[in-house]
Image: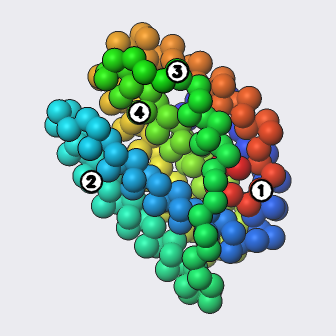
C-alpha cells in the first residue's frame, strides 16, 4: 500500500530495543517537525483553503502525538533529550530542484511530506509487530494508522493541485531515490535513520 521500494530490515528493531530512550526522543521531535510542517504549509500557501483546513486538523493531531510520546518519556523516568539532525530528511529534500512555480513548490513539499509519513508508518508497523515491550508495541500500532492517513492525505493533495500524470511520475522517481537513501540507513535508533 505504501509503495516503498526498500522495506526496513527487521533487525533495525534490535537496534531500537537497545536504546528505547533514544527512539522516543527522536520520535517526539519527528512529531514536533510534522507539526511545524503543517504550520509552514498554512503560512506558505494560505490560498489553498481545503489544504489549510486539513493542516489545522493535522497541527492539532501532531502536537497531541508529541504530547503522547513526551508522556511516555516521562513515565519511564527520562527527560526529552536534545533534537538531532534527521539525516533521512536532509538527504530526501535534496531530490527536487529549488524554485519553480508556487504550484510546483507546493507539490514537491506535499510529496516529501507523503513519503516521510509513509516511511514512518512502515517503521511504526515494524515496531508494533517486533518490539518485545508490548506497551510500546501497542502504542506504535495505534500511531501507525494515523501515519497511513497522513501519507494518503498529502499524496492526494499533491495529485489534486498538480497534473496527475506528472505528480505520479515525480512520486515514483522520489520513491526510487528514497530507496537509495535507505540502503545506507537503518543502523541507528531513530525513526527514519
Does 98 sit left or right of 178 as displayed?
left
Q: Distance between the residues labelled 4 and 2?
A: 16 Å
Does 37 sit left or right of 192 as displayed?
left
Q: Find out whether the residues at labels 2 and 3 contact each other: C-beta distance under 8 Å.
A: no
Q: Is mark 4 on a helix, strand or loop?
A: helix
Residue position for label 4: 110
- Image location of residue 114, percent across then percent down: 47, 37
- Image location of residue 185, percent across then percent down: 77, 44
Q: Is mark 3 on a helix, strand or loop?
A: loop
Per the rendering, the mark at residue 97 is 3
- Image location of residue 68, percent across then percent down: 46, 73
Q: How crowded is mark 3: few (under 14 residues within 10 Å), some or many (20 or more)?
A: few
Q: How far apart are marks 2 and 1 (CA)?
A: 31 Å
Q: Distance between the residues labelled 4 and 3?
A: 14 Å
Q: Distance between the residues labelled 2 and 3?
A: 29 Å
Label located before the other in sequence (2 or 1): 2
Amino acid at each position: 500500500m505504501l509503495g516503498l521500494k526498500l522495506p526496513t530490515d527487521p533487525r533495525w528493531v534490535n537496534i531500537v530495543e537497545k536504546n528505547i530512550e533514544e527512539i522516543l526522543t527522536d520520535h517526539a521531535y519527528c512529531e514536533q517537525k510534522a507539526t511545524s510542517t503543517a504550520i509552514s504549509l498554512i503560512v506558505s500557501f494560505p490560498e489553498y483553503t481545503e489544504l489549510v483546513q486539513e493542516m489545522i486538523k493535522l497541527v492539532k493531531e501532531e502536537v497531541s502525538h508529541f504530547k503522547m510520546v513526551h508522556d511516555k518519556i516521562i513515565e519511564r523516568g527520562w527527560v526529552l533529550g536534545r533534537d538531532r539532525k534527521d539525516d533521512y530528511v536532509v538527504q530526501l529534500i535534496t531530490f527536487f530542484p529549488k524554485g519553480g512555480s508556487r504550484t510546483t513548490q507546493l507539490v514537491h513539499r506535499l510529496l516529501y511530506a507523503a513519503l516521510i509519513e509513509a516511511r514512518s508508518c512502515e517503521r511504526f508497523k515494524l515496531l508494533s509487530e517486533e518490539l518485545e515491550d508490548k506497551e510500546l508495541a501497542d502504542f506504535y500500532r495505534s500511531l501507525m494508522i494515523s501515519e497511513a492517513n497522513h501519507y494518503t492525505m498529502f499524496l492526494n493533495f499533491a495529485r489534486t493541485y498538480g497534473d496527475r500524470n506528472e505528480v505520479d511520475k515525480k512520486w515514483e522517481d522520489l520513491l526510487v531515490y528514497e530507496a537509495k537513501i535507505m540502503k545506507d540507513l537503518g543502523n541507528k535508533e531513530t525513526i527514519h535513520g
